[in-house]
Image (cartoon, rainbow, N blue to C red):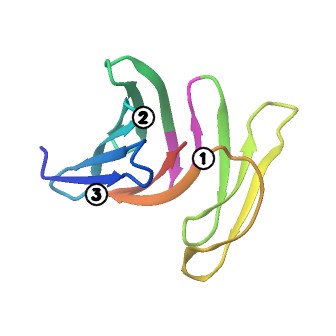
Amino acid sequence: MLDHLTTWDWDATNADRDQEWYAYDSAGQRTLDRHVSNGVTTLTVYAFGLEEHLYSGTGTNTSNSYYYTLGGRLLGKTDGTTTQFFLTDALGSVLSAFSAVAGTAAVLANQVYGPYGNQRYSKGSMGTTMRKRCLSAFSVWKIKA
C-alpha cells in the first residue's frame, strides 16, 4: 500500500538533472526508490525488509542484495556470489567490513563516527554508503552504492 511519496530534484548545472522518488508504506518504511540521472532511470525495491533488488528503467533486474541480522544487529550481506560480514558499534553504525572467503578473509574497510554521525576516520573501500533504517518489527541497514 503506497501511503506516501517524496520527490527530490537537483539541477545545479541546468545541464544534468538528478531526481529521486521515494515510496513509503503506511508504517513509514521505504519500499521503493526511483532514481533518474542524466536520463537513466533505476529502481530499487526494498522487499521483506532484508532484501534490495535493483532494476533498470526497462524492468531488467541488475542486482540483488540480501542482508543478515541477529538480535537486531546487521551481520552481513550477500549478492548470491560474494558475502561480506560487518562489525557494528552500539548504535548500529557499521565500523568494519570483512570479506568472507575461507582461508583468505580480510578487512576490506574501517570507519569511525564522531558525535552526531560525522565520519571521523575512513580507510579502505566498502564501496557503499551505509545508514540504518528501522522497519516495523526489526532493523535493517540500507546499503546504497
104 or 123, nearer to the observer:
123
Please state if 27 lies on the left or on the right of 111 as rendered: left
| Residue 45 seen by the camera | yes
Estimate the x, y position of residue 25 in percent, counting from the top left.
19, 50
Secondary structure at numbered mark 2: loop
- Magenta residue check for 77: yes
User: Which numbered marker is on residue 136?
Assistant: 3
Which tag, 1 or 3, sits closer to the chain's start? 1
Estimate the x, y position of residue 122 in percent, counting from the top left.
75, 61
The three-letter code of the residue at mark 3 reads Ser
Q: Residue at x 51, y 49 (%)?
A: 69
Residue at the spot of label 2: 38
Region in magenta: 67-80
The three-letter code of the residue at mark 1 reads Thr
Q: Quadrant of residue 119?
A: bottom right
Residue at the far front in the pictured view:
14
| Residue 74 seen by the camera | no
Above or below residue 26? Residue 77 is above
Above or below residue 35? Residue 129 is below
Residue at the spot of label 1: 128
Which tag, 2 or 1, sits closer to the chain's start? 2
Q: Residue at x 33, y 24 (%)?
A: 57
Q: Nearer the viewer, mark 2 or mark 1?
A: 2
